[in-house]
Amino acid sequence: MNPGSLPDGPSHDAKHPKKLIFAPGDIQTTPEPKITPTETPDPSATATGVTTAPAPISRLAAEALRSNASTPDSVTENEIVSHPARAHQFVSNPPLTISQMHPTNPLHQFHNWFRDPRLLPSSAPETCTLATASMPSGRVSARVVYLKELDERGWVVYSNWGSREGKGGQVFGNHADGEDTLSAMPEPGQDESLQAGLQEGNKWAALTFCWSNLERQVRIEGLVEPLSRDESEMYWRTRERGSQIGAWASWQSKVLWSMEPELLLDRRRKSLDPTLCPQMQVPGDVDATDIDDGRALLEKRVKEMEERFAGVEQIPLPPFWGGVRLVPESVEFWQGRRSRLHDRFRYVRVHKEDGEEGGYIWRIQRLSP
């Protein structure tokens, strides 16, 4: 889909459009840059296989600060004053101005940054951090996920959402029928209320992309909505069979094993062979003496799923697994500048009055660093 064909404003015809700005497999491969040595190595160091890096100019100061001495002597004091710590300076980009920002749509602006040729595929630019919060405690948890799609409504990721112990319980609440069952993902439209009750979960979430080699960061805050089963099925079919088996086998975030430290130390002493190396306590036979830490239970589940789907050509999509879309309420684009005077632009969704054409607009703000 040509991103230039996407409308600048919101869509009115469909609640869940699939006009992709990019999709799985759509990331173009960029040749890796060739690294040319800028310094000639020391022949003597090369001969011995050891290279000596120059000592930092403020190493003496750092050692003084780490020491137990309460009062530095005159040498270390002068070193600290003469060579203050220098933090990394952001100098890769020219100043970021409003003229470089898309005037009406943060998703198009994200697309422009994501397509920067300096953002190499080997750096996994689709990697991002998804943060969710439990209610009513407000306790926040975060995990690294992969962005798989970007459409005109928001950012799409796929995962297991059925476990009450993990992000699924935080976002969609706990709807499982029993202790040994996973909650099925809700269908779009099943829960239209933002917060039908604290037990229904917290739909607010945040997604953060950090592209350190470009000295850029994107922060998205918004509401999570589930994809339809048909939409999730499309992506599920692109996954390899082993990953599909793993999705069925894993009750994500469920505790597989636990032990108190005193008991663990006792079992560890009994499982190790002290005659091999008393100081290091190396296991004599890992397969025979290593402590079971719950991995065997997971492997057992995998084998059970392999047997269950042995004669099945297309493994079905689990009811608890699928995609969600983060529909943004605000999107911030951050670019580093020298002396920590960074450039920050934020798009904020402004909802129009009922009956007004368009539904919402995006207001652009420059934020203080």
Image (cartoon, helix red, strand yellow):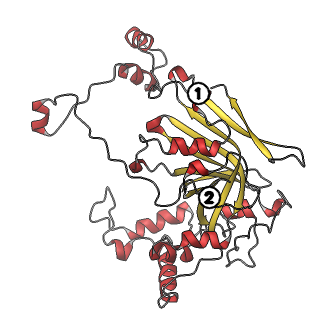
| Disc number lying in front (1 or 2) | 2
Q: Quadrant of the N terminus?
A: bottom right
Residue 19: assigned label: 2
Residue at 66% x, 69% y: name it: 163
Q: Amino acid at mark 1?
A: Asp
Q: How many marks?
A: 2
SS label for mark 1: strand
Residue at 49% x, 81% y: name it: 300
Residue sitting farthest toward the front: 5
Residue at 75% x, 56% y: name it: 203
Side of 31 relative to 218 (left or right)? left
Between 46 and 149, the one nearer to me in the picture: 149
Q: Amino acid at mark 2?
A: Lys
Between 156 and 160, the one nearer to me in the picture: 156
Disc 2: CA contacts within 10 A as few (<14), some (14-19) or many (>=20): some
Q: Is residue 127 above or below residue 65?
A: below
Query: Where residue 59 appears, x then y in whole percent?
Result: 36, 22
Residue 188: name its quadrant. Answer: bottom right
Side of 17 relative to 269 (left or right)? right
Residue sitting farthest toward the bottom: 311
Q: Earlier in the sequence, mark 1 or mark 2?
A: 2
Q: Which residue is mark 1?
A: 343
Side of 342 relative to 187 (left or right)? left
Residue 44: name its quadrant. Answer: top left
SS label for mark 2: loop
Q: Is residue 367 above or below residue 273?
A: above
Q: Is residue 162 above or below residue 368?
A: below
Query: Where residue 14 appears, x then y in whole percent?
Result: 74, 61
